[in-house]
Amino acid sequence: MTQLDVPHSDRHPSVPIVTIDPLGADPHAEMARLRAAGPVVRTVLPGLPDTVHAWMVTRPDLLAQLGRHPAVSRVAHRHWAAHRDGLVPSDWPLAGMFIGLTSMFFLDDPEHQRQRRMISSVFTARRVERMGGDITRVVRNALDALPGHRGPGGAVDLRAHYAYAIPMGVICHLLGIPEPMRPRFRALVDMLLDTDGKTAEDAAALERGRLELLDELVDLRRTRPGTDLTSSLITVRDGDGGTLSHRELLDTLWSLVVAGHETTLNLITNAVRALLTHPDQLARARALPPAGWSAVVEETLRWDGVINYLVAGYTTDTIAIGGTSIPPGQLLVSLYAGIGRDPGVHGPTAGRFDISRANIRQVAFGSGSHYCLGAPLARLEARIALCELFGRHPELRLAVPDSELRNARSLFTNSPSTLPVHLEAHPNHHR
């Protein structure tokens, strides 16, 4: 991280401007440096002019405050000054992660609450609980297929062939996405989150592709409705009898696919990696009943969170936070992956993976009124996937030293790009 020269015209010289790695090679080290720089810092996002700063808070308690602050909006085109003033390129490759959707993640009340009530009325806790059997079937099918994915040296990429397969299978089942459409959804989600050389043409192709594919899905479920969530969202009504508009429906489905896939993919991958590199914690986990594996999930979310950076909103007025005044019209970005290791919150053992840790203060799924609706599903999937995996393959081990694993090249997601493992014991163990 390099301190940039602060121009003389800068009105906030006391707030450091820092660079962040657009490819997220080492988010934990980067976020430790961000914490050291202060409770509030600024940065320039890839593809934006140097004069356009994103503001970040680096403490978990401040992040929670942003989630509840009345002067923070999610609507970019109304409140982001740089966007209104034409400083954000119209073909900005990262726009899909910061602006533009009509899903509830990018809305304020009352529009946000209207959508949230409609979606939560059909995407209920009871519906998630009933999915336990379906999730277990998806997990066991992925386990059955794992041996067939061995490479020449006998290793299997657990991320590609297990952690990837489970959340995509579950979210596609939940949304009623038929098998022929699923590879196209996978490719589009990967394109959205990849920031390695992403161009404006890539972003435009992604936008066209996702709208065309979602149109196909909605047309299919209007013609052939089922018990899936897409069919339910097509017919759900608010208190005044109104339905989701067509664009709201498409953007809601897209948000569910992206969040329902990527978060859980990284959570499973990171949890397996953590357990395989901490044999004492793996031994402790093996002694747990199936429901007890939730402790592994929660500690993974804290110790090796699944998202690096995510938009937190835009200031509609001056806000005072962390001893700093942030003016109106500013972009706010949340830190997630490394913030769980803050020793100010978790003490001197913050950097240690310990599934016996109690009372974890969790920010992995956001806070306030925008808390992730899919959090219970992600937790359930990960718990079942981990318990079943280590039950089926008790001698599972890494096929390469942990130091050789490299993070996926993305500003947004935190997880190794591959996780090669051996399913059985071997005399040459790698730890």
Image (cartoon, grey):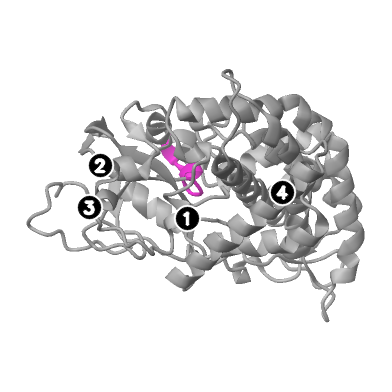
Name the residue beneath numbered marker 1: 96
Residue at (47%, 29%) from the top-left corner? 111
Name the residue beneath numbered marker 3: 85
Q: Secondary structure at mark 2?
A: loop
Residue at (50%, 39%) from the top-left corner? 105
Q: Is residue 338 magenta?
A: yes
* Nearest to N terminus: mark 2 or mark 4: 4
Q: Which of the two discs, 2 and 3, sits closer to the camera?
A: 3
Magenta segment boundaries in residue numbering: 336-344
Q: Which of the two discs, 2 and 4, sits closer to the camera?
A: 4
Q: Quadrant of residue 182?
A: bottom right
Q: CA distance from mark 2 to mark 3?
A: 11 Å
Q: Position of residue 293 (x, y in %)?
A: 76, 38
The single residue placed furthest to the top in the displayed view is 239
Q: Is residue 290 magenta?
A: no
Name the residue beneath numbered marker 2: 329
Residue at (23%, 34%) from the top-left corner? 323
Q: Position of residue 170 (x, y in %)?
A: 77, 46
Contact between labelled residues 2 and 1, with CB atoms less than 8 Å apart: no
Q: CA distance from mark 3 to mark 1?
A: 19 Å
Q: Secondary structure at mark 1?
A: helix
The single residue placed furthest to the front in the displayed view is 223
Q: Residues within 10 Å of mark 2 (few under 14, many from 20)?
A: many
Q: Quadrant of the N terminus?
A: bottom left
Q: Quadrant of the C terminus?
A: bottom right
Contact between labelled residues 1 and 3, with CB atoms less than 8 Å apart: no
Q: CA distance from mark 3 to mark 4?
A: 38 Å
